[in-house]
Every structure is written in C-alpha cells, then in structure tokens.
Amino acid sequence: MVLGIVVIYILSYIAEHLGFERTSFLLNLGTQTLAFGTILIFSPELRMFLKKLGGFSGPKRPSNATLKVLEDSLFELAKKKHGALIIMDENGDISTASENLTFLDAKISSSLIGTIFHPNTPLHDGAILIQKGRIHYAGCKLPLSARRRDNFGTLGTRHMVAIETAENFDTIVFVVSEETGAIRIATKNGLYFVASRQDFRQFFLDHYDTTQRKLK
C-alpha cells in the first residue's frame, strides 16, 4: 500500500509538471484516500510501532488479584477439558482487530470465566479480553494468518491464535486445550507449557522484573 501511494504521488507530480491539471488532481485525491485508508486499516500496528518508538518495553504483569483468579480459572477449565483463550488487552489494541465482540465490562471471576468457556454457551469458542482487571469483551474472533509453523504442527487453531496474537500485539495470552486440558502461556518470546500451579506462579517470577512489573 505504501508503494502504491508513492507511485501515485510520483505520477501526480509528473502530470502536474506536464500541465495535466485534471489528471494531477485525481491522482492527488487518490494519494490522500490511500493514505487515510492505510491509517484506518493498520491503526493497531501503527499504535504498536509508536509505542516502541516511545520506549514501550512490553506488557505489564497482571495484578496479583487478577493472576489468582486466572490461576484458579485455568486449572478448573483444564480439569474439565474446557478449551479457553484469555488475552490481556490493557491498551485496547486487540479489541480493534477482533470480530464478533460481546461487550461485558464485568468484574473478573473464576465462575464467570468458567461459564463463558462452558461448551454449551454461545461464547465459548471465542476469546475473552481482559482490560484493567475486568473482562471487557467475550466471544472475540481474532485474525489468523496462513503462516506455516513446523514447530507447532500438532497444535490447533486456538493455540495458533494465541501465538500470533502474543507476537503481533506483544501481550500475554493464556490458552487451555480442549483435547488434553493442557495449559500454555503465549508471549512474543514463545509458548510455555504450564504443568502445575507452581509452574504458573514461577512463570511470572522468571519472566518479569517484579520491581517494574514488565516482561523481561
């Protein structure tokens, strides 16, 4: 798209100097429309780029209260083999890239998370987005590219969405497999298997600077 904008701008410049005023006007209009469209389409990516320029150093560690609820929820879901996808979306970047959003803005609790991901509920196939310690949206459908990943060939769509979302938005994603009940945590640095509650707690001790609450 950027290449297209550059080409049209050059053509507009040439047309103007050749005296083709109407053609130059139309090409200028096309350049402005494409530039505006690029900003609208890629606004989440542009926000992430600007955050990196401004020294944004990664996702913040969830509060202890939120982590306790997540720990209880994940292991309860794993025991029942109820698939789940829970995404930290503190800045609202991921919600702008999601589809089929159901607005909740509800206090986070293990009972609510368990209800959302129960197989008989209409929202269980989507992700929930957590913002500022609250379940902001549920039933979210995230985009998934066709990129081939040989190292994760045995994992399903839910895990692929978790990996790509963590990479693209530099956030933390919790996923539970409905086939095995396995719990994993995805970050931009990889996918981590969580075998026990101690593993869950140790992950945040190992990967976070507890004084700054930022991912190492």
Image: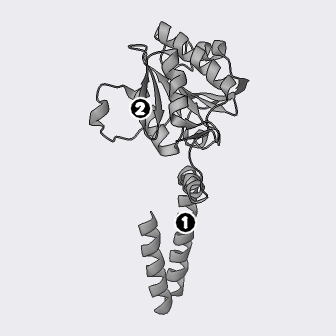
Q: Give the answer, above or below, for where 54 lies relative to 25.
A: above
Furthest residue toward front: 211
Give the distance between the C-alpha atoms of the residues marked 2 and 1, in whole angstroms.
Answer: 36 Å
In percent of width and height, residue 215 lies at 55, 40
Q: Is residue 79 above or below residue 138?
A: above
Residue 100 location in percent, x, y?
Answer: 57, 32
* Residue 103 visible here: no
Residue 146 place in picture, x, y as percent: 34, 40
Crowd rating for badge 2 (residues with CA inside 10 Å; few <14, some 14–19, many 20+): some
In-front residue for pair 45/143: 45
- When the figure is inspected, residue 112 is found, relative to residue 134, above or below; the finding is above
| Amino acid residing under circle 1 | Ala
User: Residue 108's quadrant in the figure?
Assistant: top right
Q: Nearer the viewer, residue 192 or 158?
A: 192
Percent of width and height locating residue 216: 52, 42
Query: Horizontal placement of 134 versus 98: left or right?
Result: right
Above or below 214: residue 129 = above
Q: Secondary structure at mark 2?
A: strand
Does the image show residue 215? yes
Earlier residue among tags 2 and 1? 1
According to the picture, the residue beneath numbered tag 1 turns out to be: 35
Q: Amino acid at mark 2?
A: Leu
- Compared across the picture, whether 215 is left or right of 193 comes to right
Image quadrant in which the N terminus is located: bottom left
Residue shown at 59%/33% (left/top)?
A: 88
Secondary structure of the residue carrying tag 1 is: helix
Task: Give residue 191's mark.
Answer: 2
